[in-house]
Amino acid sequence: MTDRVSVQEKIPCVFRTAVLQRQSSKRHDQSYHVGALNEVTTQALEANVRKSVASEKVDGTCVYVQEFRGKPWLWARHDVKPNKQAERRFKKFQSARQAWETGDKEGPEPTFTWTVEKDLKKPPEHWEPARGVRRIDGHLQPGPSGHIPGWVPVLKDSRSHCWHLASTDLDKGLALLLQRKKDDSDKTLEVVTVRLEELLDQTLELVGTNVNANPYGLGSKKRPVHLLVPHGALKFDTPPPFDHEELAKWFAMPVGQVEGVVWYCDDGQLFKLHRHHLGMTWPVEEPSLTTLPVVITVDIGQYEWDFPESSQFYLFGRLKGHHFDSIRAVQWLEEN
């Protein structure tokens, strides 16, 4: 596994999955559950997944660093979705397929054909498809979710991406990262500044106060905290097992208090397992990410610019050298 990870498409489950007729542990209004069977997929076995590197699946929103107008830039995930009429057709197909998979409906396997020019909403300006999206006759094709994954640049005046902007300074080309310390002998996290150019072609997870209902309990409404976690940065010292019963025990342990696991294979393929695949709930009371000590190594004095006093760069810079028992415990220094 390389340090530069770029997650462009939906990651498949490491186990075979099946639609089970029981209440979903992920969506309370859903009467069926997509569960993992106790059988590793052929694709994962052929990728030698048992010899891969396992890392924590972080619960946030995916971002991508690539150039925009000649500068390293932060891009936000944006999937092109079907319009209302096509969405109704697709949901009808999904219901038919679920009934077919569970044996409630006989006959040939249901299929669905997209008329891309008519079925999909118009993408926003500057949108780019994710790498690897399938094309037919030159037309981008939706994936199994009915969406075409892609990216839009985070514009500096964007209200919808204000929390993305809190984690970066696009003019200065800087990002605020939460990651394992390089000398990770004591399993300490660090908050550090990194130049965006060092993150080119890399994906990260934006986590924080106003992202995905804040499962890690970061910051507060008055003092929000938003940081970027590089994909693959939170590797497990001991890989989790592949047996269902042992995995359930592992997810119940302190180290297993995570949303899921992502396996990074030597050939570049990725596989995941969400605790929901085993019928286990998320979020949990004390995620393992919040049990690790953290040190602030943000050094804004190395830069020739000034930072606004309201920016996270300035606030974390004032905490340089401070240690906290948990990223949840970070508190800003009040001005004298």
Image (cartoon, helix red, strand yellow):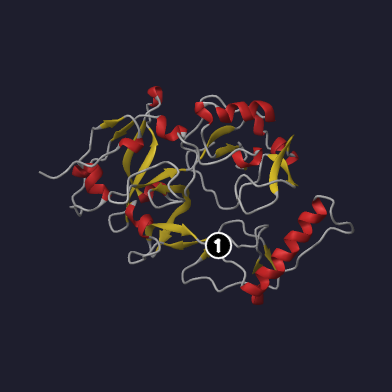
| Identity of the residue drawn at 46% across and 47% down | 205
Residue 256 in percent (x, y) is at 54, 30
**The residue tagged with tag 1: helix, strand or loop?**
loop
Asked if residue 278 is positioned above or below residue 210 in the image, the reply reads above
Can residue 138 be seen at all in this image of the molecule?
Answer: no
Asked if residue 131 is positioned above or below residue 234 in the image, the reply reads below
Can residue 205 be seen at all in this image of the molecule?
Answer: yes
Q: Answer with left or right where residue 85 lies relative to residue 109.
A: left
Amino acid carrying label 1: it is Asp
Residue at the bottom extreme, as displayed = 118
Q: Answer with left or right where residue 213 lies relative to residue 136.
A: left
- Residue on which disc 1 sits: 79
In front of the other: 134 or 231: 231
| Identity of the residue drawn at 46% across and 51% down | 212
In front of the other: 101 or 115: 101
Q: Answer with left or right where residue 314 lies relative to residue 87.
A: left
